[in-house]
Image (cartoon, rainbow, N blue to C red):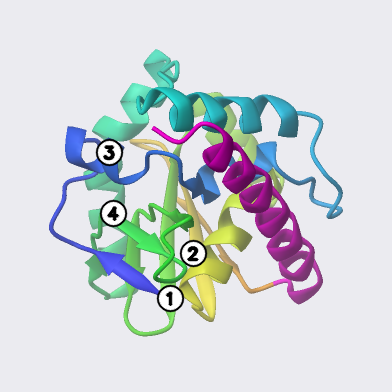
Amino acid sequence: MIVIRDIEQGSLEWHDLRLEVLSSSRFKDLITTKGAPSASRKKYKNELINEIITGERVESYKSKDMQRGNDREHESREAYEFAHSVTVEQVAFCFYDETKTFGCSPDGLVGEDGGFETKDALPHIQIERIENDWKGTEHFQQVQGSLYITGRKWWDLQSYCRGLPIVTVRIFPDEKFIRALSIEIRLLINELNQIKERYKR
């Protein structure tokens, strides 16, 4: 794993770093939780092809809820640190290896073994998660991808809503899924490399 620490997440440098790179936040568009190719794989591939050909990132839509989550990430991280008596290291990006073809942008790394991801929730969603023993399955591919990329032993996925109890789920590597994920990643990288050869800038 290669960790990039000296760039701020969300900055222009950070976006440039991720250009043409497969990211765990998009693994849901690559593979299903069952390990099959996702229905949105072609769309994701085309977005990456666009970046390869133009050298410019594809603009993604950010809703008000997504922006609120970004704005409250710091307080959510502090709440996690206080609750678990740990320090969360903020990093820009983690590449799987020196090829820098895929990686993840974690909300933090915890010690030598753990990782941290927080999701901001509206009050009614947070209450539902509290009442129904939330497992964070809608973020399964992202978290498993982050575990695979970083080689960490566990990942804490937190659901945060200001003024309500916090929900935190500790997730461990699913080796069967990770094997399927690694295959899908390499298949897509091979396809993209062929595109790069065809459309070298």
Chain part drawn in magenta: 174-201
Return the disc, 2 or 4, that comes first in the chain's sequence: 4
Look at the numbered discs 2 and 3 and tell me whether their residues touch, using CB distance below 8 Å: no
The C terminus - image quarter: top left
Mark 3 closeness class: few <14, some 14–19, many ≥20 residues within 10 Å: few
Give the number of the mark in front: 2 or 1.
1
x 67%, y 59%: residue: 186
Badge number at residue 77: 4
Measured in 3D between alpha carbons, the distance from the residue under mark 1 to the one under mark 3, in whole angstroms, is 27 Å
Return the disc, 4 or 1, that comes first in the chain's sequence: 4
Return the disc, 1 or 3, that comes first in the chain's sequence: 3
40 lies above or below 181: above
Return the disc, 4 or 3, that comes first in the chain's sequence: 3
Label 2, on which residue?
156
Label 3, on which residue?
16
Look at the numbered discs 2 and 1 and tell me whether their residues touch, using CB distance below 8 Å: yes
Badge number at residue 114: 1
